[in-house]
Image (spheres, rainbow, N blue to C red):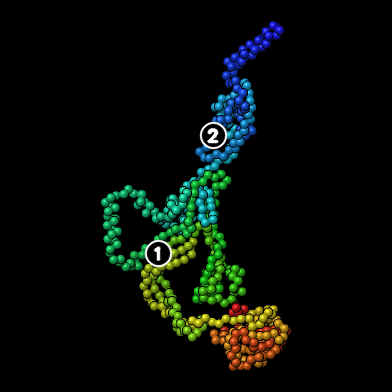
Amino acid sequence: MHFNRKIKLCSIETAAIALAVCALLFPSMQLFQHTGDNYFAVSLNGVEVGNLPSKEHLDELLVKARRQAVKELGSSELVFMDTKLETVGSERLWAAVDDEEEVVRRMADVMKRSTRETLHRSYTVKVNETAVNLGSYEEVHELLEQALSPYDTQNQYQVELGLDHDREINVLEAVILPREDVASAEEEFDSSAGIGAELDAMFAAVEPEVERRFEDFTGGLTDIDYAEKIEVVEAYLLEEELNTVEEAVNLVTKEQETQIIYKVVSGDTLSQICLTNNIPMDELIAINDALEDENTMIRVDQELVINVPEPELSIMWKEEQVYTEDYEAEVQYIPNDDWYTTQRVTLQEPSAGRRKVAAVIEYKNGQEVGREILKEEIYADAVPKIVERGTKIPPTYIKPISGGRLSSGFGARSAPTKGASTNHKGVDWAVPIGTTVAASNAGTVVHAGWASGYGYAVYINHADGRQTRYGHLSKVLVKAGQTVSQGERIALSGNTGRSTGPHLHFEIRINGSAVNPLKYLN
């Protein structure tokens, strides 16, 4: 027993001596108390970076390591790097831990190896729905100047970027200013000159304006601006997201197809509209359901859809010009309340005049969009065209039968039978013999009976000057001179005259000329 007690005391003494020696030789070794997890193995992105006695300051160490990594990478931009931090805790009585600075150094090394991309400080330029990204403020300026330069050939204007005060976030807005205004604004303010300028402005306000002579108009560019609002915002973007200036210029200035509404004016023809707007005839017909072919009649104020090429960023500018031209006087209209609007008579033919003009002409991407005449001198007066026209709304026309299949349209066709016309002056609906035929509009019957190739037919004159014709009838139910109302039963369909089968032939004539009836039916 005494011997065993002696051995146990020796073991305790040996352990105590060993602990003391370790504490002297290995200062990183710590003696822990039993308090749960007190030893944490730390790894970053799967790489072990050290052992710590606590997780309390781990986030601070990670931030410090990130700063050190960015500094050592030597980048002034934002750096995007992976940082997946993991810890494994355990309870130890005695264990070695690492110095925090050493752990930070190891974290920084791992981060430098884990760097994925650098985010560059850049600028996003937005025009409508198009956005381009440029790497510097200077490149933004270059883009906007290049879009402007084709129209500002004398380099009179410059682009400035200022804060858009209508926005809550910092958004820059592009504006165009005359270079001379920018230069004067940058000069140091002179108080005496300022007072003089105010006096000049005051006297100018009370002095009567002197009429300018033609010699006073110097001509040239008077104003220029972007047609669309341009917004510029600062951003941090990846290298592959940035555009070159050349790419950006192409994106915002390349022409794209845009649809506009064109309103027909007096004297317009389809061929002239195509020529003026640089659009092929077949394309104009394809995008307008109201147009059947190049011979389709158009009316004043009719709206047509037109495809025009326009860039995303359009330039508007005004130019002062002095020129001599032939000019037309405005058409003078004399209303006639007894006539329908379809009726008009020219009372006086026009004659062009001659004049000298000073004007400001407004352009959009090279196309004139407005003209303001500032001064004119008439050499020879223009004679206006005088037209008397009706004011009453003309009556409507209805389909003269119920149902039926359209078997032959208006215009050119192959002759359906020997002796038939190849220029069809109406439309045909295939219907069974005996189908009711009604008056398309109210009027007076001027023919009711046999009419050669028409077979049995009815002609009706209407109050608006038009005439309707109904052919190949089996039975006529009205007489010449009889007044009929719209929709009134006037005949039964048949297969008489020059016909290839049971059908109704229907015409509308204006001033004696046949027109396509389908364009006038409601």
Q: Nearer the viewer, residue 421 or 473?
A: 473
Q: Quadrant of residue 355?
A: bottom left
Q: Nearer the viewer, mark 1 or mark 2?
A: 2
Q: Mark 1: few, some, or many residues within 10 Å (few <14, many ≥20)?
A: many
Query: Tag 1: residue type?
Result: Glu
Residue, disc 2: 63
Residue 246 is left or right of residue 332, and the answer is right
Circle 1 — which element?
strand
- Which mark identifies residue 431? none
Asked if the residue at tag 2 contacts the one at tag 1, i.e. Cβ–Cβ closer than 8 Å, the answer is no
Where is residue 373 shown, x and y percent of the image?
A: 39, 69
Query: Tag 2: residue type?
Result: Val
Q: Quick check: can you spot residue 484?
A: yes
Residue, disc 1: 320
Residue 392 is left or right of residue 89, and the answer is left
Residue lying at 66% horizontally and 90% vertically, measured from the top left: 476
Image: 510 above or below 37: below
- Say whether disc 1 or disc 2 marks the residue closer to the N-terminus: 2
Q: Quadrant of residue 410?
A: bottom right
Circle 2 — which element?
helix
